[in-house]
Image (spheres, rainbow, N blue to C red):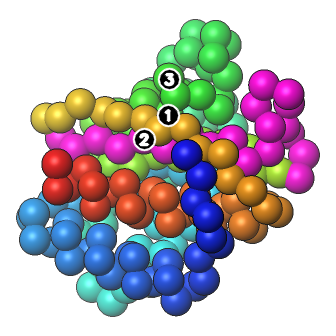
Amino acid sequence: MELSFVPTDAELAASAEQVAADVLWHGLMLVSAESCTGGWIAKVLTDLSGSSAWFEAGVVSYSNAAKVSLLGVQAATLERTGAVSGETALEMVSGALERMGAGIAVAVTGIAGPSGGTPGKPVGTVWISWKRRGGEARARLFHFGGDREAVRRQTVAAALTGIRETLTG
């Protein structure tokens, strides 16, 4: 799946406001586990005044070691599938939810570029996962275009959209 646009700061802020309203309405706390976005999801969400009422924590786990120690990703998963995989994204989101005690979580892992891509996982390959406490984790593969910033912006936008979808069923 691919977004056809690169969202502006204003569009990301508007999406964050919608997420905030939805998370508050459901009476939950949200946590993010981020790799390729480097904390951008948490930044967009905590730019909103009062976000402490619904945003629990954000974990930036760039290295494999951090994914293991902070989020409980299995070293065997990283060895078998790599950091940029659906399996890793699912373990990241489940670990974030478990360790932070929140009600809903989002996790992202991908290759923002310009380096790091391979024929099997080119630049722009991003896995995003979402999970609500008591529910099943789901992960979705995206292939975003553009430069590093464009890939990251599209990832943040897709992550926020997926949070809303996870809350509404």
Q: CA distance from mark 1 to mark 3?
A: 5 Å
* Earlier sequence position, callout 2 versus callout 1: 1
- Residue at 61 percent of width and 64 percent of height: 4
The quadrant holding residue 120 is top right
**Residue 119 is at least partly visible in this image:** yes
Q: Secondary structure at mark 2?
A: strand
Q: Position of residue 98 (x, y in %)?
A: 28, 36
Q: Secondary structure at mark 3?
A: helix
Tag of residue 129: 2
Q: Amino acid at mark 3?
A: Glu
Q: Are marks 1 and 3 in contact (CB under 8 Å)?
A: yes
- Towards the viewer: 155 or 70: 155
Q: CA distance from mark 2 to mark 1?
A: 6 Å
- Residue at 65 percent of width and 32 percent of height: 84
SS majority, magenta: loop
Q: Secondary structure at mark 1?
A: helix
Q: Amino acid at mark 2?
A: Ser
Q: Is residue 74 above or below residue 27?
A: above
Residue under numbered circle 3? 87
**Residue 31 is at least partly visible in this image:** no
Q: Amino acid at mark 1?
A: Ala
Range covered by the magenta-colored residues: 114-133
The local crowd at label 2, few if under 14, some if 14 to 19, many if 20 or more residues have their Cα within 10 Å, is: many
Tag of residue 8: none
- Residue at 66 percent of width and 45 percent of height: 143
Extreme residue toward the front, this view: 4
Q: Is residue 107 magenta?
A: no
Residue under numbered circle 1? 89
Q: CA distance from mark 2 to mark 3?
A: 9 Å
- Residue at 60 percent of width and 36 percent of height: 66
Q: Are marks 2 and 1 in contact (CB under 8 Å)?
A: yes
Q: Position of residue 12 (x, y in %)?
A: 49, 78
